[in-house]
Image: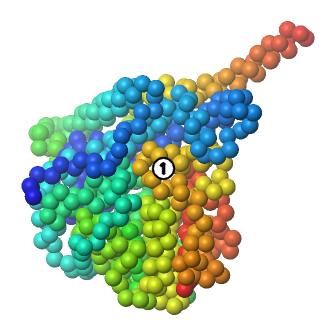
Amino acid sequence: MSDEIKITPVNRGKRPAFFDDPAIDQLMAIVMAMSAEMSVLYDRVDTIERLLDKKGTLSRDDIEAFRPDQGVEDERNGRRNDYISRLFRIIREERETLVAHDKMDEYNALMDELAKS
Amino acid sequence: MTMQTEHDFLITGSHDEANRQAYAATLRMHVLTDIGNGLKDVYDQRVAPAFEKSNGRAPKDGREAMKAMLDDTYGKTWSSMIHTCQEMLWDSVRPAVERAQPDFNEKVRGLNSKVGSVSLDPSVEVPRYVSASDIHLMPGNYHTERAEDDTSQGALFDRGLYLYQGGFAGPLCDNNGRSQAEVIKRRWPEFKPKKILDLGCTVGNNTLPYADVFPDAELHAIDVAAPCVRYGHARAEALGVPCHFHQMNAEATSFEDESFDLIVSCILFHETSRTGLEKILAESHRLLKPGGMMLHMEVPRTEGMDPYSAFRLDWDTYYNNEPFLSTWMRTDVGESCVKAGFDADNYIHIAAPDLGSVSDEEFTRYAKAEDSATGTHGHWGELVMWNMYGAWK
């Protein structure tokens, strides 16, 4: 057996498409992967800033060796969550629209009521 | 996110890889809860009314609810996103595990057991319910070996599981096992098992807490997947927890009759099959000493569940490669226990949340409750109730 190991699916099956056009599912996967890379980049900048704050200088090895403690990780996670909320705002808004729609019915009813009174 | 406990065999990867993993876990939790909980509003306000309008009645079960939800834009978007998250999660761990080899396998092979042991049996056949699908979309599943004495899948699972749970199962990913062990101890304080067996242990994360809760017991753990057994042993040694790992099939082990006082499993049954489940129960009966007990922790069941909640659980059956999950949820466990040789009067069904998700006093109340198998469901974002099924011999 070779020393090289490639971890590949053995029985994953066909990738499901949830949209009528599977290209949309692929696009979704690309957007989400891109969102991850942006977050990774932000974390790298964060590492650089922290190292510079502390030492005023840095090396590539310093960056690679940096590991967050729980406090730094919590801070980063808060930022990641905010970032995700902004990124996927459009989906959250669809949910909010449902509630807004209810309010709209109430408002229309109020208009009718006021027109008659 | 609670950080995972580092040990000699945990592979986390480079600076960027570790951050990519953290992001994948956070993103998945966001999609699962923040966006996922919007599914209920969409179902109540848009999907169910539309279904009623065209069918003259409400959706009757999870399958109908799922079909209607997957026709809705929000349902499609959420499904596409959560499926992608699952793929991203494994992808974020994979390169680090690949790169660590072959040195990593060498390091595990060279390990000197100090507190526990490991025994492999290449004649153990991986049952079809494990080999036929990559459960949870984990590439290669629990069992695939790509080199001699390969441990890659164990390392992949240890890190991937932590990310999958988003840290909610604790830094050692052991909250389920710890919760069940504590339920047993608090409900039956006079029960002092001397020998404990955990079935389908994977990397032993939910096995090891039994050593904390029952420190005088001898702990054994079995799994069909050699990479997990090898890795689980290395992990236990690194953490200094005495446990004996064996590559065995829970349907037919090579232990002698009446070897154990307590037999447990943790979220194993829904990854087996109907006949697999029945054989495991019968084998548990054979292995238990008279007066011993088996208790198996499982995910909430859809029986008696509203169509929306059933849809959320059924989704995983279809799209997260959990082929038996849906059938498991409709299985009468009490009946299966009787068929396996247990007395119907000795049947146990307890529902309790994770230790730490409620106050300690409340947890004890759930553990001790006479009629505690109520409020048996819940999904992420709510209080998850784990069901424990078993029997005294």
Q: Residue at the spot x=67%, y=40% of the render?
A: B59
Determine the chain carrying the residue at label 1: B
The quadrant holding residue B20 is top left
Q: Residue at the spot x=13%, y=37% of the render?
A: A57
Q: Residue at the spot x=25%, y=58% of the render?
A: B144
Identity of the residue furthest to the right in this view? A117
Q: Compare residues A3 and B42 and report the one nearer the observer.
A: A3
Q: Compare residues A49 and B365 and report the one nearer the observer.
A: B365
* Residue B132 on image: x %, y %: 35, 55
- As drawn, B77 above or below B199: above
In the rendered structure, the answer to whether residue B214 lies left or right of residue B13 reads: right
> Split into 4 quadrants, where in the image is the C terminus of chain B?
bottom right
Callout 1 amino acid: Thr
The kind of secondary structure element at disc 1 is helix
* Residue B188 on image: x %, y %: 57, 82
Q: Residue at the spot x=72%, y=29% of the render?
A: B53
The quadrant holding residue B21 is top left
Can residue B229 be seen by looking at this rendering? yes
Can residue A67 be seen by looking at this rendering? no
* Residue B64 on image: x %, y %: 61, 41
- The residue pinned by badge 1 equals B317
